[in-house]
């Protein structure tokens, strides 16, 4: 596939510093642009700042700065933030750019000449926060719904844009193009708004009240309304009306906005375009809000840590992944540090990180880190349709990425990760490695696993570009955009046999949720567990261990032994065992729990107590977790 893809963020209003909401919108734009470049398209990502209007004048005054100095300062904050989030924008536009101002004047003049702008006296209720007039119908108990303040009565002569003339046309355009505004809930919201008569839009502000704006080309006593100015950035940045970039990218334009600015983008903007004789954008993609749960955020110097700072604590790729995986695009989502840590530990460290470490460890152990060859004769038998799974995953991913359902696209990738883990369990490479006669099978299995990792590295590229590159390097490939193209990902057997794999790394260290801090950034971590396995045993050897279900009847600490608990258990009969879990559990936490016990372990005297069996628990750094069952069982039931 070729062609172009043009994606925009809103231009951010400079009356406040960048926050999580801005970061999310802009990361989405970056993810979408990177994904479309994987399909072979030429992409263009536009972002920038909206710098005119009352609110900017007031914010500047509050800091004792001139509007010009103030907008330069805040605009620079946005501009320098995006590279820190690995966002590669093509152009950063400011509405104070001279080239933008020229385009705004041209479009205003065009619409004015066509008779869609008229002059009229108007008396109305004006909210200074919103910089717009309100109708009684729009107010909530007489107050602005956004600012909860009473609007002031203002009487002035102004210029109005005849939006009402285009109402029926807009309804029919939205009805005939169901994807024009998506997800569907926002399309419905716009259509429901359009059921009421659309009022004409006041598009001027007298200079007596506001000077910080673009002067109307047909009346020097007025500046234009900030929205009319701002929306036009999407075409001025491309060099409208006859720039090469405008011709190339505008036919494939898509916008991303948060739901609070649905109306200007879903109603004003298409009507402005129509009135100016400019083709419409293709899609308006609307997302919900992040609700930050401050109670689940760590603090520094008594203040809640800003969500954006967490990228420095947990890593940028993990942060980007969380935002894209946790929010269903279009709906609101909760942001807190605990959920972020859980996602990192389960999806990244556990699922993806462990698979990567495990496969590379086997490639090093069995083949000295050289990518094995595949024998076509046995390939079919040992592929177990992994190739078809990859093709299916890529198809589902492509469809969901295309429609901004990023969380679903990632869920498909993680299903494929699970399939690879299952493939390891079924093919049991450690068994194949035992016999010389199964060498060819082992080669095929390891090769297929490396191929699976290559596909995954490509699919995560738009969301986690750095991790994708790290994975490729460790698969012995040159990190290269062509390798991330969907056409290449679909091409099974791309990893080159005979190439040398570098030493493995830990992609995502596990994070201790208690400490809410990064685990040490070393080469150990999860990889250590995957690599340093004990010598293999046979099933007969394993069957010698008699594992039983037991219910804990009583638990108490042992005097003078801070690590030990004494447990009375029911194992189909009463028994006493001693367990070294006192630093991770209070005695009362265990009473009533069903645990797993090695029932035929030779009894041993521990701190004066005869322990008749051993409880099974996992050890991870400084904490222990007792193995339990996910269903109630009769005490004494055997495990196998
Ligand atoms: Zn308001």
Image (spheres, rainbow, N blue to C red):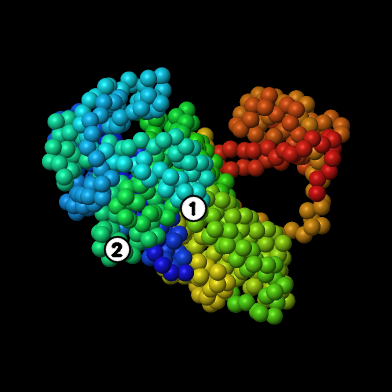
- Residue placed farthest to the right in the image? 573
Residue drawn at 83 percent across, 35 percent down: 635
Decide which of 471, 363 is in the foreground and name it: 471
Disc 2 beta carbon < 8 A from ligand 1? no
How far across and down, in percent of the image, does residue 349 sit?
54, 50
Q: Residue at x 49, y 62 (%)?
A: 458
Secondary structure of the residue carrying tag 2 is: helix
Quadrant in the rendering for residue 76: top left
Query: Can residue 552 be seen from the camera position used here?
Result: yes
Foreground residue among 488 and 155: 155
Q: Is residue 492 left or right of residue 158?
A: right
Q: Are marks 2 and 1 in contact (CB under 8 Å)?
A: no
Residue beneath label 1, please? 177
Q: Does 94 sit left or right of 350 as displayed? A: left
Instruction: Give the crowd class for mark 2: few <14, some 14-19, many >=20 residues within 10 Å.
Output: some
Q: Residue at x 12, y 41 (%)?
A: 220
Q: Residues within 10 Å of mark 1 (few under 14, many from 20)?
A: few
Q: Nearer the viewer, residue 632 or 618?
A: 632
Q: Residue at x 47, y 37 (%)?
A: 195
The residue carrying mark 2 is 245
- Image coords of residue 48 (percent x, y): 28, 48
Q: Is residue 591 left or right of residue 119?
A: right
Q: Earlier in the sequence, mark 2 or mark 1?
A: 1
Residue 226 x/y as whole percent: 26, 39
Task: Tell me the SS state at disc 1.
Answer: loop
Rounded to the nearest angstrom, the CA distance separating label 2 from label 1 is 25 Å
């Amino acid at each position: 596939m070729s062609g172009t893809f043009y994606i925009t963020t809103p231009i951010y209003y400079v009356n406040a510093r960048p926050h999580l909401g801005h970061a999310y919108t802009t990361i989405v734009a970056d993810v979408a642009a990177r994904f479309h470049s994987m399909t072979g398209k030429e992409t263009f990502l536009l972002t920038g700042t909206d710098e005119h209007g009352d609110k900017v004048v007031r914010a500047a005054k509050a800091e004792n700065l001139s509007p010009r100095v103030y907008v330069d300062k805040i605009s620079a904050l946005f501009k320098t933030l995006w590279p820190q989030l690995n966002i590669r924008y093509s152009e950063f536009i400011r509405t104070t750019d001279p080239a933008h101002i020229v385009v705004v004047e041209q479009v205003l003049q065009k619409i004015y000449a066509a008779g869609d702008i008229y002059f009229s006296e108007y008396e109305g209720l004006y909210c200074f926060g919103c910089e717009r007039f309100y109708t009684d119908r729009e107010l909530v108990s007489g107050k602005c719904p956004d600012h909860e303040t009473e609007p002031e009565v203002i009487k002035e002569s102004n210029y109005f844009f005849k939006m009402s003339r285009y109402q029926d046309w807009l309804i029919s355009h939205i009805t005939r193009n169901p994807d024009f505004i998506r997800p569907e809930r926002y399309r419905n919201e716009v259509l429901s708004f359009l059921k009421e008569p659309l009022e004409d839009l006041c598009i001027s502000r007298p200079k007596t009240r506001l000077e910080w704006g673009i002067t109307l080309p047909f009346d020097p006593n007025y500046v234009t309304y900030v929205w009319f100015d701002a929306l036009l950035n999407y075409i001025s940045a491309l060099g409208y009306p006859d720039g090469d970039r405008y011709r190339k990218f505008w036919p494939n334009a898509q916008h991303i906005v948060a739901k609070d600015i649905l109306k200007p983008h879903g109603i004003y903007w298409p009507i402005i375009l129509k009135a100016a004789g400019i083709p419409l954008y293709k899609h308006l993609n609307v997302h919900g809000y992040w609700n930050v749960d401050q109670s689940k955020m760590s603090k520094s110097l008594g203040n809640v840590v800003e969500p954006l700072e967490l990228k420095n604590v947990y890593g940028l790729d993990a942060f980007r992944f969380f935002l894209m995986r946790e929010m269903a695009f279009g709906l609101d989502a909760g942001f807190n540090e605990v959920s972020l840590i859980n996602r990192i530990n389960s999806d990244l460290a556990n699922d993806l990180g462990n698979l990567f470490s495990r496969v590379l460890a086997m490639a090093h152990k069995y083949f000295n880190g050289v990518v094995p060859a595949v024998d076509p004769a046995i390939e079919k038998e040992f592929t177990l349709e992994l190739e078809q799974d990859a093709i299916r995953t890529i198809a589902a991913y492509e469809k969901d990425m295309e429609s901004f359902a990023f969380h679903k696209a990632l869920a498909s990738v993680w299903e494929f990760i699970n399939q690879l883990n299952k493939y390891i369990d079924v093919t049991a490479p450690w068994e194949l490695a035992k016999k010389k006669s199964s060498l060819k099978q082992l080669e095929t299995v390891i090769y297929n696993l490396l191929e699976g990792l290559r596909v995954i590295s490509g699919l995560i590229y738009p969301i986690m570009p750095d991790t994708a590159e790290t994975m490729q390097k460790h698969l012995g490939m040159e990190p290269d955009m062509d390798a991330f193209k969907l056409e290449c990902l679909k091409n099974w057997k791309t990893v080159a046999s005979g190439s040398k794999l570098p030493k493995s790394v830990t992609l995502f260290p596990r994070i201790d949720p208690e400490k809410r801090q990064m685990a040490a950034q070393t080469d150990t971590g999860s990889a250590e567990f995957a690599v340093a396995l004990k010598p293999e045993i046979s099933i007969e050897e394993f069957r010698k261990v008699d594992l039983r279900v037991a219910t804990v009847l009583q638990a108490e600490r042992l005097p003078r032994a801070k690590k030990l608990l004494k447990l009375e258990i029911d194992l189909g009969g009463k028994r006493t065992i001693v367990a070294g879990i006192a630093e991770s559990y209070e005695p009362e936490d265990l009473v009533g729990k069903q645990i797993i016990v090695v029932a035929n372990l030779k009894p041993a005297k521990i701190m004066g107590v005869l322990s008749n069996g051993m409880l099974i628990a996992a050890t991870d750094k400084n904490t222990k977790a007792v193995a339990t069952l996910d269903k109630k069982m009769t005490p004494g039931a055997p495990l196998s």
